[in-house]
Image: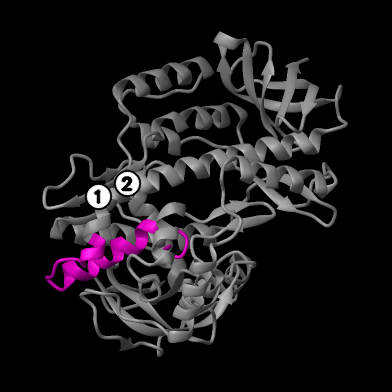
């Protein structure tokens, strides 16, 4: 996408971002003891985690794995290989073996529990683990042997899981690909990546068949430019979706194994309640969208076209059906809620341990169940606390994301007071006499004073802008 012309001096944004991270207590460095432990761990090499059920490391450097990530990424959690078999497909998915570098109860372990996630800002990131681990020793960088957790997942010719296994293995990524590079290789006939594509398409169809919910909503991005920062709406390539399906596939396989073994950590989302569905049906009626009584909420969402203004407004409203995501830890008795309703399956986070705290523990649970053993004591001791730790981190991450967009929007609109912009109404707040408007250019989503209907294309005038307060004020023209 072409860069947008609405930019500001990046010093304004960068100073605001630094102040924002201080306000939200997002750490900007690691304590000295954490850095020292990480460097010592990297120098010593990977270890078999204490009490792990997987104590041997298979040599699977024969696999032609590749990573597919944004070009600037160095914390590479996953490497993939896929191939057609006589009965369907086989997917190999190597995951960074972070537990091999983190001593339970040590300085890195304590710090990662406090952080929970890697936190991203446009100008920097606050990583879950020190660089010596996250961008070096544990990262699946190309042309280097790495100890990893290797998933082997067999699928039938429709893409359904037939068997799944996880082991410790020595692997070697053959290439670090961007999404664009991977897409070009697929177009050029690369056999392995076309197998990834085929599996991705099959899994997307199974997702539809399960009744999963896919909100194809334009999402904001803050992107660096030659002179500062710009806002744009994300336009993803098909390979991003196919690659995501491999991760979802792995998470679904992991959840089944842990549920069968009655110990683990799930990512969950309750199904929308009847009241929410009734409210959404009233919104659809108000927008003139035909939603037959026989049509489910997921099917209704999938029927919408995001390029149509009315449908786009309905997609934005439909997000209220996806609230309440969380984590469920269990050991023995299964939790009341096990499903992730948007995926319409049981699901677990296991594919990003460099960037998410819970994945390290969940993978060890999978290894233990497959070996017919109990997970290590350090896993069982922390398991009950993980939903709270991860929930706290997710809330902080959400606060950071919202504040970043508010800041950048205010900075990019400074000096434009009095100008008018075209937009689309995506929400109505009658109690405050305002509407939420998604501007076309720049890619700003903000409230405007006045009255309009959902899905209306409107013109709004910019009033006050306050970068320090991260606020902008619009009114309908």
Name the residue at the front extreme.
Answer: 33
> Can you see residue 346?
no
Label pair 1/2, CB-CB below 8 angstroms: yes
Is residue 293 shown left or right of residue 289? left
| Residue 130, position as x, y percentages in the image | 53, 67
Q: Which residues are magenta?
A: 352-379
Distance (Cα) linking label 1 and label 2:
7 Å
Kindly state the secondary structure of the residue where label 2 is placed. helix
Q: Residue at x 15, y 47 (%)?
A: 334
Is residue 91 shown left or right of residue 241? left
> Can you see residue 84?
yes
Q: Main secondary structure of the magenta part?
A: helix
Residue 74 lies in magenta, yes or no? no
Quadrant of the image occupied by residue 300: top left
Q: Quadrant of the C terminus?
A: top right
The front one of 338 and 2 is 338
| Residue 126, position as x, y percentages in the image | 57, 56
Crowdedness near tag 1: few (<14), some (14–19) or many (≥20) residues, C-alpha within 10 Å: some
Quadrant of the image occupied by residue 179: bottom right
Q: Which residue is mark 1?
A: 384
Q: Which residue is mark 2?
A: 387
Q: Residue at x 74, y 32 (%)?
A: 468
Q: Considering only vertical position in the picture, is 299 above or below 463?
A: below
How many circles with numbers are drawn on the protein? Answer: 2
Quadrant of the image occupied by residue 381: bottom left
| Residue 373, position as x, y percentages in the image | 13, 70
């Amino acid at each position: 996408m072409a860069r947008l012309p609405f930019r500001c001096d990046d010093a304004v944004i960068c100073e605001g971002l630094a102040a924002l991270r201080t306000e939200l207590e997002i750490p900007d460095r690691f304590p000295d003891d954490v850095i020292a432990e990480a460097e010592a761990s990297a120098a010593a090499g990977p270890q078999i985690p204490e009490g792990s059920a997987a104590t041997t490391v298979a040599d699977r450097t024969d696999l032609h794995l590749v990573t597919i990530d944004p070009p600037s990424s160095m914390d590479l959690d996953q490497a993939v290989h896929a191939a057609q078999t006589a009965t369907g497909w086989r997917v190999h998915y190597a995951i960074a073996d972070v537990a091999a570098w983190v001593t339970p109860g040590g300085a890195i372990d304590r710090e990662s529990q406090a952080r929970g996630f890697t936190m991203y800002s446009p100008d920097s990131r606050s990583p879950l683990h020190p660089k010596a681990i996250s961008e070096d020793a544990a990262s699946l960088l190309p042309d280097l042997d790495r100890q990893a957790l290797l998933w082997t997942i067999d699928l039938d010719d429709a893409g359904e899981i037939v068997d799944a296994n996880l082991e410790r293995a020595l692997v070697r990524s053959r290439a670090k690909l961007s999404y664009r590079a991977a897409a070009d290789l697929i177009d050029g006939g690369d056999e392995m990546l076309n197998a990834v594509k085929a599996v991705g398409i099959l899994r997307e169809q199974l997702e539809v068949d399960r009744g999963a919910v896919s909100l194809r909503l334009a999402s904001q991005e803050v992107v660096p430019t030659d002179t500062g920062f710009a806002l744009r709406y994300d336009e993803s390539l098909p390979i991003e979706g196919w690659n995501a399906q491999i991760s979802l596939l792995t998470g679904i396989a992991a959840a089944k194994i842990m549920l069968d073994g009655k110990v683990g950590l799930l990512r969950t989302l309750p199904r929308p309640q009847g009241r929410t569905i009734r409210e959404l049906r009233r919104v659809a009626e108000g927008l003139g969208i035909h939603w037959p009584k026989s049509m489910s909420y997921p099917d209704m969402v999938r029927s919408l076209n995001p390029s149509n203004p009315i449908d786009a407004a309905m997609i934005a409203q439909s997000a209220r059906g996806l609230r309440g995501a969380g984590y469920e830890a269990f050991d023995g008795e299964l939790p009341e809620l096990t499903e992730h309703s948007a995926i319409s399956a049981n699901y677990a986070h296991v594919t990003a341990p460099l960037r998410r705290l819970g994945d390290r523990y969940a993978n060890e649970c999978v290894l233990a169940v497959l070996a017919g053993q109990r997970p290590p004591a350090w896993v069982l001791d922390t398991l009950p606390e993980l939903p709270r730790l991860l929930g706290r981190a997710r809330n902080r991450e959400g606060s950071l994301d919202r504040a970043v967009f508010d800041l950048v929007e205010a900075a990019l609109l400074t000096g434009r007071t009095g100008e008018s912009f075209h937009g689309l109404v995506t929400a109505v707040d009658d109690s405050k006499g305002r509407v939420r408007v998604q501007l076309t250019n720049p890619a700003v989503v903000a409230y405007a004073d006045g009255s309009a209907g959902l899905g209306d294309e409107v013109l709004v005038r910019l009033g006050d802008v306050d970068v320090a307060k991260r606020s902008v004020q619009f009114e309908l023209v």
